[in-house]
Image: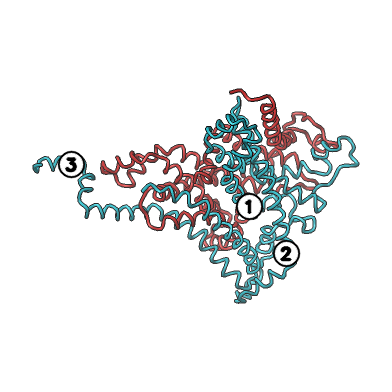
Chain colours: A cyan, B red
Amino acid sequence: MNTKDEDRLREEQPCRLLDRLSILHMTQSTRDQTTGWLMVFPALTVVTIFSLYPAMDSFLLSLHRVYLSLPGLGQSFIGLRNYTHLFQDPVVHQAFIVTLGFVILSTTLELLLGLGIALVIHEHFRGRGWVRAAVLIPWAIPTVVASQMWRFLLNDQYGVVNLILFGDRVGEYVPWLADPWTAFCAIVVADVWKTSSFAGLLILAGLQAIPDEMYEAARIDGARAWQRFRHVTFPLLKPAILTALLFRTIDAFRVFDLVFVMTQGGPGDATQVIQFYGYKTLFTEGRMGYGTTVSVTVFVALLILSVFYVRTMGSTLLKREPT
Amino acid sequence: MTKPFSERLVLLIGIFVAVLGSLFPFFWFVMTSLKSQIHVEAIPPTWWPDGSLTFYESVLFDRHVLTSMGNSLIVASSTTVIALLIATPAAYALARLRLSGKAWMLGGLLCVAMFPQLVIAGPIWQILKRLGGLNTHWGLVLPYVTLTLPLAVWILATFFKELPLELEEAARIDGCTAWQTLSKVMLPLAAPGLFTAAILTFIYAWNEFFFALLILTDPAKHTLPVGIALFQGEFTMPWGEIAAASVIATLPLIVLVLLFQRGIISGLSAGAVKG
């Protein structure tokens, strides 16, 4: 190869030429590192300032006694006393029980209904696009709107639920949101209506990953619909169901909007979930130290769940590295 | 292959229940918004509306619903644009470039998505107070961008990963830098993913309530969810007005769902299962 050829090559394919020279190749990969860091830098900055720093700050605040209404008192460091107080606070106990009940009941129902929805919208039939859109609508509706809507549907005088159940027998109309147990069921129903379709979509993605041949094989072996579901669909669907379960659990733990709009935690403390109690202590009563203690405790509980989540789910993305 | 009659019957019942259950509650609220006051407060309730538009008139002209709608639109669209501008390069780098600490960053983003809002709410409120961001649109957009970034990055990273590696290699061999490869080759190809991420971010910001309630205390700055949650009547609950405002707040979302059902479904599952 003469110099003239090399010049031409350099002009046309500069990178390929660089590739041949190992030292230059190394600098290119370092340059990739630099560009990569520049590309993730804005995202990291935003997340650090508005998520990581606030979370750290909350943790520090939870070790202090701070009242928003009494700035003169300043912040006195009291170690873990907020936490010992938290574990003896009967209101917190009650709130944890309500939250736990809400999480277990609503996620169970959402997974069951979600599985049903997924099985239906996975089938091939005319107008499937419309059915899928219809099922998505509860997911798209703002939670605040859904909450006001259910509050009205369950109204003791004008509500359609009473109309459907009792018709003209006005005397039998039930004030659903005034009784502790039915009010609790009401927020569960509203949450299940709003989010079952999301669980359904996650499960649908799992269904779509099952190859058709599996069903064909089962069919040829003479398996009936229920047997195909029991022995083919369900075992292969487990990872998707687990994903939906974790997403829904974490989200249900953070329930706030529904309770704020529908019941304000009442009647009594029947629907006072932990997130709502924390909000009241923080922003209504202004007990910054104790309020953040409540939120940090919820956070730690969720962190354990997320670590579990990243372990099981996040690894798949990393396994599929192109290099 | 035709299915046995019993299987088709079960499917039909399933479709019927799913559609009725999803639509009826909201359908009833839409009907309520079209009644007149006497019908809304009838006991027992009346089934059919009389087609009165008085609630829409009062909501659009007397209440602050139009202002709230404008606020929601500004906040949701700014959040979408800024979040995507930040998320796209990050997602590309995390999906395609050799970068040390990638696993930690993806895991960290996922953890951030799991934060209870309450744990960051107090400090964010104090930061915004110091910066003068309370009761401003940008003061709400900043936390929204943070909260939507993880989902946007995950969706986009999934899309970038599915693009053929050869195209990218060809661009690099032709001498494109990483930035040029992203903007000239990858972005046009990832347009559907970008679009999906944009819709999901927009819906999130349009619907968010907790931070909007904390940061925007001035009624003139309220977004639609805050306005609807804090609707108060003088003596009784103004259910007709609440229903009309709710329908107005939900209509844009229903249009989005009808138009982009396919993209939304693939985007939501991309963040989770395929991820």
| 10 Å crowding of disc 1: few (<14), some (14-19), many (20+) | many
Whether tag 1 and tag 3 are in contact, CB under 8 A, the answer is no
**Are the residues under marks 2 and 3 on the same chain?**
yes
The correct choice, above or below, for A282 with respect to A137 in the image is: below
Q: Viewed as shown, does residue A184 lie left or right of A299? A: right
Chain to which the residue tagged by mark 2 belongs:
A
Amino acid bearing label 3: Glu
Q: Nearer the viewer, residue A132 or B247?
A: A132
Q: What residue would you read off at disc 1?
A: A249
Amino acid under disc 1: Thr
Looking at the image, which residue is at 30% across and 56% down? A30
- Image quadrant in which you'd find residue A233: top right
Residue A157 disc label: none
**Where's residue B252, x and y in %?**
59, 36
Q: Which disc is residue A11 wearing? A: 3
Q: Which residue matches tag 2?
A: A93
Q: Secondary structure at mark 1?
A: helix
Residue B61 percent location from the top left of the image: 67, 39
